[in-house]
C-alpha cells in the first residue's frame, strides 16, 4: 500500500494542527494526526443536504462547515434537479467556514469537484463563524450544520454555543416560515433532540451511513420551523 503524502498543514482554529494528506485518489484531513474527514467516506455528508433540501425549489441555503465540499456539492446537485423539474430560479448557497486554509485547500488541492463547487456562481464563501452568518432574521430557507464532531461530543468547546439554547434560537430566527435546520452528528443523542424540540422545531431523526450503505452509522437531525 502506498504511503500517505502530506500536502499542507496549518494551525487549526482553537488549537491543534490541521493537515491535508493524499494517497492515490483519496484525500483526508487530520487534526493532530487523527482523521477528521475523508473523500472515501462522505455518504452522511451527502445525506445532510438531501434531508435538508428535499423537495425545495430555489431555496436560500446556509452551510455551516465546508469540510471537503461534499455537502456543498450535494446541495448544488439538488438545486440543479429542482430547477430542471420546475423551471425556477437556481437558489443560493452561503458556506461559512472558520478555517481559511481549508477553503484554500478545497480550491487548489482537494480536487476538481471541490474547486468547481466553490466557483459556482450560486455560492458565496464566508470565512468566519457560522453564527455570524445567522445574524439576519429570516434570511434562509435551510441551514445545514456540520460543525465539529457532533452537538454533544465537541472537540472545540466554543462550538457548544451553536447547539445550545441560544444557538438554536438564533438558527430558528435566521429561517423563514417553514424553514429547516439539519444537523449532522456522529451519533444519536436524546438530549439534543429534546433541546431542538424545546427551541420550537418539529423534530425528525434520520440515520445515515458514512460510505453508501456501509461504514459508520451517523445521525441527521431535522428541525422544521412552523410555516
Image (cartoon, grey):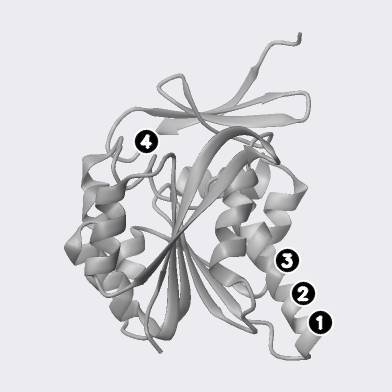
Measuring 69% from the left and 34% from the top, which residue is drawn there?
A: 40
Q: Quadrant of residue 221?
A: bottom left
Q: Quadrant of residue 22?
A: top right
**Which x, y percent locates residue 130?**
36, 61
Measuring 67% from the left and 59% from the top, which residue is drawn there?
A: 74
Q: CA distance from mark 4 to mark 3?
A: 30 Å
Q: CA distance from mark 2 to mark 3?
A: 6 Å
Which mark is first along the chain, 4 or 1? 4
Q: How many marks?
A: 4
Which of labels 4 and 3 is toward the front?
3
Can you identify the residue that label 4 sits on? 12
Can you identify the residue that label 2 sits on? 81
- Could you tell me if the residues under marks 2 and 1 are in contact, i.e. CB atoms within 8 Å? yes
Q: Does residue 37 appear to the left or right of 224 in the view shown?
A: right
Can you identify the residue that label 3 sits on? 77
**Which x, y percent locates residue 64?**
44, 59
Amino acid at each position: 500500500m502506498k504511503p500517505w503524502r502530506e500536502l499542507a498543514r496549518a494551525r487549526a482554529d482553537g488549537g491543534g494542527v490541521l493537515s491535508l494528506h493524499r494517497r492515490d485518489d483519496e484525500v483526508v484531513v487530520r487534526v493532530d494526526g487523527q482523521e477528521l474527514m475523508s473523500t472515501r467516506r462522505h455518504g452522511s455528508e451527502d445525506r445532510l443536504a438531501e434531508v435538508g433540501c428535499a423537495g425545495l425549489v430555489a431555496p436560500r441555503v446556509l452551510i455551516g462547515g465546508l469540510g471537503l465540499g461534499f455537502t456543498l456539492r450535494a446541495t448544488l446537485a439538488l438545486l440543479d434537479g429542482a430547477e430542471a423539474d420546475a423551471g425556477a430560479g437556481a437558489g443560493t448557497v452561503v458556506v461559512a467556514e472558520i478555517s481559511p486554509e481549508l477553503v484554500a485547500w478545497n480550491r487548489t488541492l482537494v480536487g476538481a469537484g471541490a474547486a468547481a463547487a466553490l466557483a459556482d456562481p450560486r455560492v458565496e464563501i464566508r470565512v468566519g463563524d457560522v453564527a455570524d452568518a445567522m445574524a439576519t432574521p429570516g434570511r434562509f430557507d435551510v441551514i445545514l450544520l456540520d460543525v465539529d464532531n457532533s452537538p454533544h461530543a465537541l472537540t472545540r468547546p466554543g462550538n457548544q454555543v451553536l447547539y445550545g439554547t441560544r444557538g438554536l434560537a438564533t438558527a430558528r430566527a435566521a429561517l423563514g416560515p417553514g424553514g429547516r435546520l439539519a444537523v449532522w452528528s456522529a451519533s444519536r443523542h436524546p438530549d439534543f433532540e429534546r433541546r431542538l424540540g424545546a427551541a420550537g422545531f418539529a423534530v425528525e431523526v434520520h440515520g445515515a451511513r458514512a460510505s453508501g450503505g456501509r461504514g459508520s452509522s451517523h445521525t441527521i437531525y431535522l428541525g422544521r420551523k412552523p410555516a
